Amino acid sequence: MANNFKPNIIGFLCNWCSYAAADLAGSSKLEVPATLTTIRVMCSSRVDPVHIISAYLQGADGVLIAGCHPGDCHYQTGNYYTRRRFALLHKIMETFKLDPERFRLSWISASEGKRFSEVTKEFAEHIEKLGPNPLKNKPFIE
Amino acid sequence: MKGKIIPLKDNLNNTIKEVIKSLLEKGCFDAILVPNRVPSGESFTYLLINDQDFLESCTPLPPIMPIQGARALRNLTRRGKTSLKVLCVMRPCEIRAAIELSKLRQVELENISFMSIDCPGALVTKDYIDKPKDSDILYEEVLDQWTSEHLRPTCNTCVNFSYENTPSDIHIGIIGQQKNHILLLPISDKGNALLGKIDIQCSDEISSWQTNVKEILQKKTDQRNNSFSELQNKTAGAENLDNLFSDCINCHNCMRVCPICYCRQCFFESSDEVRIEAENYFIKAQNKGGIKFPANTILFHLGRISHMALSCVNCGACEDGCPMDVPVAQIFSYIGDTVQKMFDYIPGKDRNEPIPILTYKEDELHEYEDSKGQ
Ligand code: SF4
Ligand code: SF4
Ligand code: FES
């Protein structure tokens, strides 16, 4: 089953780093999973927990949030707040047993095209192993 | 710490009123924000008063809490600090919520002082309104027991019912002694000075009251642990969680009565949420095998949790205001406790400690970062 399962992964990418890294990966002809749908945000801290929960409840199999390395945020401290919010959300999902392992926070700088490729490939494999989001055919859980 | 024992004058509320009156008379305050019975006699609400006659009709410790006091104070100071000196007479959870709101810049604490009272809990408002007279008698029993099935469920599991963790100025101890006397305690320097102004020297021993507080704390802690271990099972997994929220009608009343939820442009009330194109609903329906209307029930609750659980003060207002008897406050209290422990944070305890998502450390939480591909 894992073989024909094509996950749907949402990636929130920071404009200043991870989004540029995705570009670089593309222009360097590095492999990026086709199952990744990217959403560009101006800073990783723009991602509200509600965006992540919403993606999950609507059936996304995995959600990636990628931003600048700590200390390198274009707005100085945005990603430190991102990390706190992500940890908080992770704890909530863990406590309610709502697939915490489907959510990931990565730091990928603009020059790390290779890292972008590796992180997304690894995350896609990890999600393929987990299988489809169990909420897919649950219209009442939304 | 030492306190001042004041013998009871006919009843508890009247004795507390005498203290408030002398504070007013000595000019310590320009006005008092205090619960009052509404004219119909069926309920209570906050009144801002500076008139001695109105003070006569106030009830410092009412049996119900239909309006969370922090919301009243938020109304008062929404446009900035008051030029008047105001004493707020509130339950500990109301004061803690006000402190949280001050950190969110929704309440301005300058010129505000707090008087807290040992809180036995609040009766369920709907039950009270049905039978106010019987409920008043029932509340006398609650004052003996400090726990009751007639209280809000989260009051029975509240561990912050006394002065500890509540940065009040003057605290009134009543546990175990409410039949004979009350105990005045200066919690802050300001409180100490205020009591001085009305010629109260705090030199009485308080150890028997402290023992009573400890006993009740143990009882409530046990009840809290039991409740949380039940909730751990009841909230485990999407299906269980959905069962708990399945009666929800998306009225958002829980949010409106919550003292912490202040956003005037809440996402869940915004046009983005309520006015999406029909086509988008079809796409959602395809992904989910169908779509429920009104939509976004679980998203609303999980979203609200992610926004404010760190500041949840366990007051139970949300559940009390829910028309469908969804155990909202119990769920929020459980998850609130979990995430608050994670950051070692007690909401409302310390005026100067920022809410954990409004601050950060550079070197922390690495276990939540991706370690792959480094
Ligand atoms: S979520 Fe409920 S219990 Fe918590 S502060 Fe808001 S109203 Fe009170
Ligand atoms: S939990 Fe209760 S108060 Fe909150 S939205 Fe649902 S029905 Fe309304
Ligand atoms: S600008 Fe990239 S994380 Fe803030």
Image: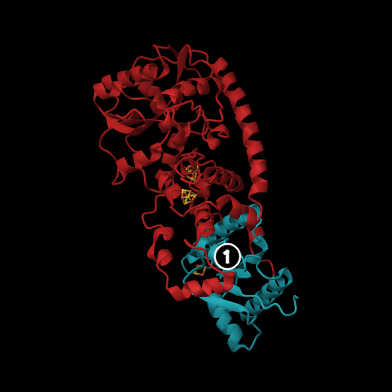
Chain colours: A cyan, B red
Residue that appears at 44% across and 45% down: B258
Q: Identify which residue, B104 or A137, lies in the foreground.
A: A137
**As drawn, B112 above or below B75:** above
Left or right: where does residue B305 sit relative to residue B195? right
Mark 1 burial class by Cα count in 10 Å: few <14, some 14-19, many 20+: many
Q: Identify which residue, B139 or B265, lies in the foreground.
A: B139
Furthest toward the front, the residue is B130
Name the residue carrying label 1. A139
Say whether mark 1 is within 8 Å of ligand 2. Answer: no
Quadrant for residue A64, please give it. bottom right
Q: Identify which residue, A24 or B230, lies in the foreground.
A: B230
Q: List x then y, in percent, for residue B92.
A: 46, 32
Quadrant for residue B89, please give it. top left
Left or right: where does residue A37 sit relative to residue B110? right
Q: List x then y, in percent, for residue B67.
A: 39, 38
Q: List x then y, in percent, for residue B176.
A: 54, 17
Kind of residue at badge 1: Pro
Tag 1 secondary structure: loop
Q: List x then y, in percent, for residue B306.
A: 53, 54
Chain ID, mark 1: A
Residue that appears at 25% across and 27% down: B50
Quadrant for residue B82, please give it. top left
**Residue A49 visible to the viewer:** yes
> Which quarter shows the C terminus of chain B?
bottom right
